[in-house]
């Protein structure tokens, strides 16, 4: 059966929006780095917009090399500080105050619609079709649902604010430029996690642990697994990327297979330990750097500094919870 909203069409939509931002950036003479900033976002958007076309016409090997080269250029542009901010049309303080008084708490409705519609579609749109056509991509149902929810939130925002599509895209460019390169860091780190998995990094972790830790020392293995999840998450910026590597290298061979740990609490607490690392790293840009940028904090690491004591305390608690709850 065919599908109306496939994940590829979602990617095309993302690519088109990014390309609109590229054109707006090129036209913004207030951005002293407009050409390199536009190049940064063009390369990012091209992956979504032209990735499939390159694979079909150039073959996987060449297409992957081209996209990999684009990723390297993206990293160089960001690392050399060539992604800058421009000037954006902003409402006056009086206009903002008047708008706030008129809209009030209805302003939160679009944001609330995103998780609500995503959950509803994910739960109830499975195998839903009309005339032999699935409405949403069944293999990527959650992502397709998120796209529907985001579009619904945008339409609702236009209705509430009496704005326009142009204003929405212009303000999205302002937010994207404010956050900068960090906004795409989660995607890049997720790809890096995939590389580690393909490279069988978990097996290498297992061999390293065997060199320094007695496999019979259950408590030390628990400590290494929890702390390792936190540290590797700090490096990767994402607990989901760290989880398969550390679980394959430590949890499965030592704690589950050798010490017969209960997998359910062990792996749940292990993931939670990874989240402790998320609180302590700038690599988790969407949790730590993005809020600081949106709130215009003077110290972009202030969020992390405040979270570190809580993260360390929770990590210590996770070690003992795992040790006492995971073994029969």
Image (tube, grey):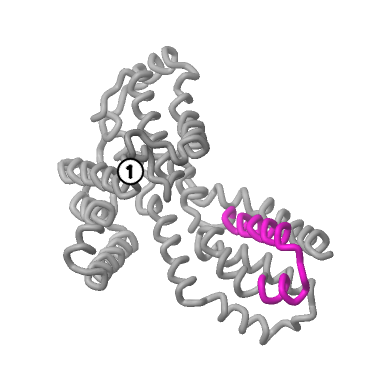
SS at badge 1: strand
Q: Is residue 48 above or below residue 20?
A: below
Q: Is residue 43 above or below residue 261?
A: above
Residue located at (47% from left, 49% from top): 286
Instruction: Tell me residue 181's x, y (percent).
Output: 35, 53
Q: Residues within 10 Å of mark 1 (few under 14, many from 20)?
A: some
Residue located at (47% from left, 40% from top): 126
Would you say residue 110 sits in the magenta stretch?
Answer: no
Would you say residue 269 sits in the magenta stretch?
Answer: yes
Count the marks. Answer: 1
Q: Main secondary structure of the magenta part?
A: helix
Residue ID for mark 1: 3
Instruction: Tell me residue 302's x, y (percent).
Output: 54, 48
Q: Which residues are magenta?
A: 252-279
**Position of residue 282 in the picture relative to residue 19 (left or right):** right
Residue located at (77% from left, 70% from top): 260
Pick whichever, 217 or 92, lies toward us.
217
**Position of residue 170 in the picture relative to residue 270 (left or right):** left
Q: Is residue 190 above or below residue 160?
A: below
């Amino acid at each position: 059966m065919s599908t109306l909203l496939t994940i590829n069409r979602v990617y095309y939509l993302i690519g088109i929006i990014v390309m609109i931002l590229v054109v707006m950036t090129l036209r913004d003479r207030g951005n002293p780095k407009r050409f390199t900033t536009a190049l940064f976002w063009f390369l990012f958007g091209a992956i979504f917009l032209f990735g499939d076309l390159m694979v079909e016409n150039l073959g996987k090997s060449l297409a992957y090399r081209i996209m990999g080269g684009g990723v390297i250029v993206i990293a160089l542009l960001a690392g050399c500080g060539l992604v800058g901010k421009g000037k954006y049309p902003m409402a006056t303080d009086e206009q903002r105050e008047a708008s706030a008084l008129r809209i009030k708490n209805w302003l939160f409705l679009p944001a609330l619609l995103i998780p609500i519609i995503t959950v509803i579609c994910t739960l109830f749109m499975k195998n839903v079709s009309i005339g032999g056509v699935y409405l949403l991509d069944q293999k990527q149902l959650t992502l397709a649902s998120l796209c529907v929810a985001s579009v619904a939130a945008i339409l609702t925002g236009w209705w509430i604010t009496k704005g326009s599509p142009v204003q929405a895209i212009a303000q999205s460019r302002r937010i994207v430029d404010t956050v900068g390169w960090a906004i795409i860091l989660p995607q890049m780190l997720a790809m890096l996690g995939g590389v580690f998995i393909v490279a069988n990094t978990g097996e290498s972790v297992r061999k390293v642990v065997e060199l320094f830790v007695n496999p019979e020392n259950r408590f030390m293995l628990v400590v290494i697994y929890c702390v390792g999840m936190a540290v590797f998450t700090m490096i990767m910026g994402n607990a989901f990327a760290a989880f398969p590597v550390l679980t394959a290298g430590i949890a499965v061979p030592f704690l589950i297979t050798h010490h017969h740990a209960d997998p359910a609490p062990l792996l749940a607490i292990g993931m939670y330990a990874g989240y402790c690392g998320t609180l302590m790293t700038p690599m988790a840009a969407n949790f730590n750097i993005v809020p600081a940028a949106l709130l215009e904090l003077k110290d972009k690491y202030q969020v992390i500094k405040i979270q570190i004591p809580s993260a360390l305390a929770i990590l210590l608690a996770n070690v003992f919870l795992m040790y006492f709850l995971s073994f029969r």
